[in-house]
Amino acid sequence: MTEITLPPVRGKLLRDEPLGPYTWFRVGGAAEALFIPADAEDLADFLKALDPSVPVTVLGVGSNVIVRDGGVEGVVIRLAGRPWAQVTTDGDTITAGAGALDSMVAKAGAKAGIAGLEFYAGIPGTVGGALTMNAGCYGSETKDVLVSAWGLNRKGERVDYALADFGYTYRHSQAPADIIWVEAVYRGTPDAPEAVQARIDEITSRRETTQPIREKTGGSTFRNPPGHSSWKLVDEAGWRGKLHAETGGGAMFSELHSNFMINPGDATAADIEGLGEAVRADVLKKTGVQLEWEIKRIGRRL
């Protein structure tokens, strides 16, 4: 394979960088190149100068992704570090960088007495990912609190989006997939800081007791089909806590929450994705309901 030509940067640019350590599952091959931009200007300059034929993939904190064993072609961009994680408040609004953890947005709201974003404490990802998939939990979604966001397209040009421009539906946005989000503005409602914090504590406690957050996992595996709960379908099909025989016990659905896959040992990406596909097929056969992936799968299979 011919090595891709990359423009100069101020941030970090790593060749053949293993991506497993950057994901919650701790699996997957290497990125042909991994770019961690210093700031939005660095990212814009890089995109403008990069050959348009080079594929670009964005990776957040790796909480909701399977990187396949064959690695990822082109450039993987990761928005990590302080310049990407700033969270500020002003009145009833919160402005957050795309690399900020969703939980930090919720905490900033509590500190400033801004209610409405407590549910972000239950989402194990970043603002960029939340914008992309209308992330939500416990009855609330990103669309309920978002005001606007801006990002960069594949050409490095700034694009500004108001809430209505996203065309949000359940776990889906109509915004072009090539936009790399840089910053978002949210609006909540005034409330006592201690009341907001109490609700965050309740969500955090509930998550710790019902989800395998200390395991090598990837968050919710499947979207909820209309009229159904994915965890119930997986559970009723008999997959809770069951090792996948064809992968030699390399991956399983959690005993604690049957819509969470876990890597209990040394599973490969193929083991984990194979388990998900086996369960999809089994649930379809037994119930007639087609489960759709919520976890993103990127890269090449071996």
Image: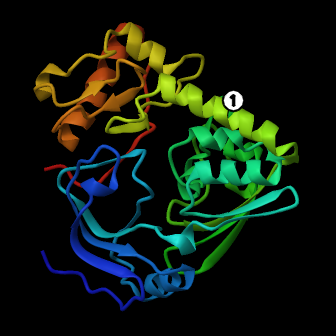
| Percent x, y of residue 115 | 80, 43
Residue nearer the viewer, 161 or 12: 12
Taking the spot 41% from the left edge, 83% from the top edge, the residue there is 11
How are the residues colored? Answer: rainbow
| 233 lies above or below 107 | above
Decide: is 257 above or below 174: above
State the residue lying farthest toward the bottom.
Answer: 8
Residue 126 or 48: which is nearer the viewer?
126
The reply, left or right, for residue 249 in relation to residue 175 is: left
Question: Residue 284 at what x, y percent from top left?
Answer: 37, 16
Residue 164 in view (yes/no)? no
**Location of residue 94 in the rendering, given as x and y in whole percent from the top left corner:** 76, 59
Q: Position of residue 264 (x, y in %)?
A: 23, 31
Q: Compared to 217, does 291 lie above or below?
A: above
Q: Image quadrant of residue 233? A: top left
Nearer to me, 137 or 203 = 203
Instruction: Name the side, left or right, on which 238 lies relative to 78.
Output: left
Amino acid type, callout 1: Gly
Classify residue 199 as left or right of residue 134: right
Q: Quadrant of the N terminus?
A: bottom left
Indicate left or right for 160 with 100 as reference.
right
- For label 1, the SS is loop
Rendered residue at 58%/63% (across/down): 98
The residue tagged 1 is: 139
Q: Going 36% across and 80% down the picture, which residue do you hit? A: 12
Q: Nearer the viewer, residue 203 or 27?
A: 203
Residue 193 in view of the camera: yes
Q: Quadrant of residue 237?
A: top left
Residue shown at 45% from the left, 78% from the top:
37
